[in-house]
Image: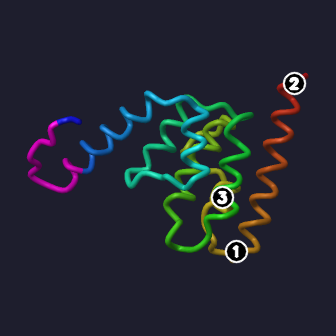
Amino acid sequence: MANIPEFSNWQDAWEWHAQQTQNDFAKLSEAKLLRKIQKRQYDPYYQIWYSLREMGSLANSAPVLLEVLRRESGEAQMLHRYHCAAALFHLLGYPDDPLPELRQRVQWDKQGEPARQEAIDELEQLIQTQLAGNKE
């Protein structure tokens, strides 16, 4: 384990720990990252989502990420939904800026949970269409 340096503020500590976590995830395969996500073994620095963005494939990752988006409801899971959706839309080829309207509806529950679930259904159709197009 790395020696933990002294930090003068929370941001330096956060960034150091996030980098250590990212380094650990970079050693894992996509399948191992997906298993951690399925088991809700998320890290407090949200690095699992960034690692999946870098090494994941849409075909392998989409089913797991859609499952997370469906099951993680409520305010307590808002940031995990945000980062999960960011990873999934990245794998779909969408930029983070501007934030796609569908991504906003998928990750936030401002219109209520039933509307968010409907947006996830739309996203699933978009993914299936893109994956089907890649097979041709």
* Residue annotated with mark 2: 135
Residue under label 3, please give it: 69
| Sequence order check, earlier mark of 2 and 3 | 3
Q: Residue at x 77, y 51 (%)?
A: 123
Q: Which amino acid does label 1 sit on?
A: Glu
Is residue 79 one of those drawn in magenta? Answer: no
Please state the horizontal and vertical placement of residue 102, each as a whole percent of the image: 70, 55
> Label 1 belongs to which residue?
113
SS state under label 3 = helix
In contact (CB < 8 Å): disc 2 and disc 3: no
Q: Is residue 128 above or below residue 111?
A: above
Which residue shows up at 44% across the image and 27% down it? 27
Answer with mark 3 or mark 1, whichever residue precedes in sequence.
3
Q: Say which element carries label 2.
A: helix
Q: Which amino acid does label 2 sit on?
A: Lys
Q: What residue type is labelled 3?
A: Leu
| Magenta extent | 3-13
Quadrant in the rendering for residue 89: top right
Q: Is residue 34 left or right of residue 66?
A: left
Marks 1 and 2 close (CB-CB < 8 Å): no
The C terminus lies in quadrant: top right
